[in-house]
Amino acid sequence: MSHGVLQVTIVEGRNLKDKDIVDYKQRTKTVKDTNNPTWNETFTFNLRKHQDELHLHVYDDDVVGRDSIGSKTVNLKKHVFGKGPYDAWVKLPAHLGLGSHGELHVIIQHNA
């Protein structure tokens, strides 16, 4: 049973630590050779009851494989459900929360 539709736009990245892909069940295109990529890609997810978090993962697209740069969980209850579009820069915390591995500009909207 569907609990609404979540529309997620990954707009751009800023100050990413030599990394360039975003991954979350769906994946943006790869933007090469920049720490400040622009994607402007929108994804739609059908939510089920009790799905109230969005997990964002950013990876470096290396010749040899993918290295994780960082991840962020967005609490949909706190920021999205019943609040209109959530348009924000979310920080990708560095290891142990010391510093940042860059930021992602996301726009998230829930339609019940």
Image: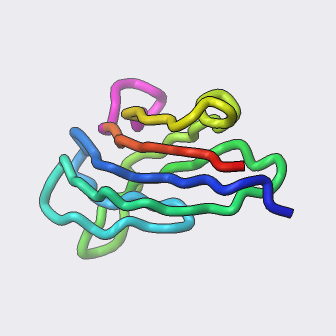
Could you tell me which residue is drawn at 55 percent across and 45 percent down?
A: 109
Viewer can see residue 102: yes
Viewer can see residue 94: no
Could you tell me which residue is drawn at 22 percent across and 64 percent down?
A: 31
The colour scheme of the drawn protein is rainbow
Position in image of residue 107 (x %, y %): 44, 43
Q: Nearer the viewer, residue 111 or 42?
A: 111
Which quadrant: the N terminus? bottom right
Range covered by the magenta-colored residues? 91-102
Could you tell me which residue is drawn at 56 percent across and 66 percent down?
A: 25
Location of residue 82 (image quadrant): top right
Position in image of residue 92 (x %, y %): 40, 37
Location of residue 46 (image quadrant): bottom right
Above or below — where is 1 with respect to 97?
Answer: below
Q: Nearer the viewer, residue 89 or 46?
A: 46
Could you tell me which residue is drawn at 43 percent across and 52 percent down?
A: 9
